[in-house]
Amino acid sequence: METTLGEQLLLLSLDDKWGYEKEPEKVAWAIAAASLVDLALAGRIEVTDEVVAVRDPAPLGVPSLDAALADIVGYEKPGKVKDWLHHLKKPAVAGATDGLVEKGLVRKETKKVLGLFPVRRYPEADGSAEASVRERLDEVVRRGETPDDRTAGLVALLHGAKLHKLAFPDGDARAVEPRMAEIAQGQWASPAVRGIIDAAETALTVIVTSTAIGAVMGAN
């Protein structure tokens, strides 16, 4: 079953049994960046000097990506990658969640905490898509196989958002980081796609790092 990069990131982050999300803030930023990467892989956008530009405004037939593309097409002036990450963060996460529910990969459950506050959870309904994603990651990261464009893009997003542990929860994240960095920085894609990957990874690293520093400062 075909899934977007954002949906793949969300699958990796959801607890299979209980449906809660691990590393939700980092994952949200990564999903926003994934929208841009998917659009670049489809030939719809490109980036020059960190500015996103439209190459082809034609919809893809994927609701979450078409919504992101429409926003970029309709924007009154070119925006930088980091600006689009902020703009797309919330709708991209909602789109990825809706996509997984519609494809029958997760179930939507609503429960009340303390009998008052509704909390939504998304336990696994069909594990085949996540298993396929994890198998591809294992092939290219641990077994050294050459990644296809989309797998390399997913690795770059995981690396930029510092989500190595989500990809390989049972291993030492430090053992896979060098290989993930190598894939993220490799010349595996066209200049248009390479540009968006580099810009998205840089923006993700800056945002995630500054968020972490802010959390530490706030706690002191």
Image (cartoon, helix red, strand yellow):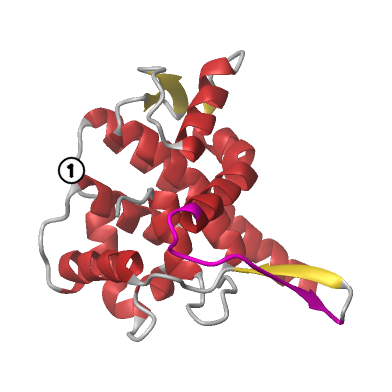
What residue appears at the point 41 percent right and 24 percent down from the top-left corner?
Answer: 59
Q: Quadrant of residue 213?
A: bottom right
Q: Which residue type carries mark 1? A: Gln
What residue appears at the point 35 percent right and 86 percent down from the top-left corner?
Answer: 170
Q: Tell me if I can see residue 220 in this picture.
A: no
Question: Relative to the observer, which residue lies in front, 157 or 67?
Answer: 67
Question: Relative to the observer, which residue lies in front, 202 or 93?
Answer: 93
At which x and y percent is residue 106? 49, 66
Q: Tell me if I can see residue 185 in this picture.
A: yes
Q: Magenta span has 119? A: no
Q: Is residue 172 left or right of residue 12?
A: left
Q: Which quarter of the figure is the C terminus placed in?
A: bottom right
Q: How many numbered marks appear?
A: 1
At which x and y percent is residue 193? 29, 34
At which x and y percent is residue 118? 79, 68
Q: Is residue 182 left or right of residue 85?
A: left
Q: Magenta span has 110? A: yes
What residue appears at the point 60 percent right and 49 percent down from the top-left corner?
Answer: 94
Furthest-top residue in view?
A: 76
Magenta region: which residues?
Answer: 102-114
Q: Which quarter of the figure is the N terminus placed in?
A: bottom left
Q: Crowdedness of circle 1 by 10 Å Cα count: few (<14), some, many (20+)?
A: few
Q: Is residue 45 left or right of residue 144?
A: right
Question: Relative to the observer, which residue lies in front, 150 or 155?
Answer: 150
Q: Is residue 176 left or right of residue 53?
A: left
At which x and y percent is residue 61? 40, 31
Q: Quadrant of residue 82?
A: top right
Label 1 sits on a secondary structure element that is: loop
Residue indicated by mark 1 = 187
What residue appears at the point 47 percent right and 25 percent down from the top-left corner?
Answer: 51
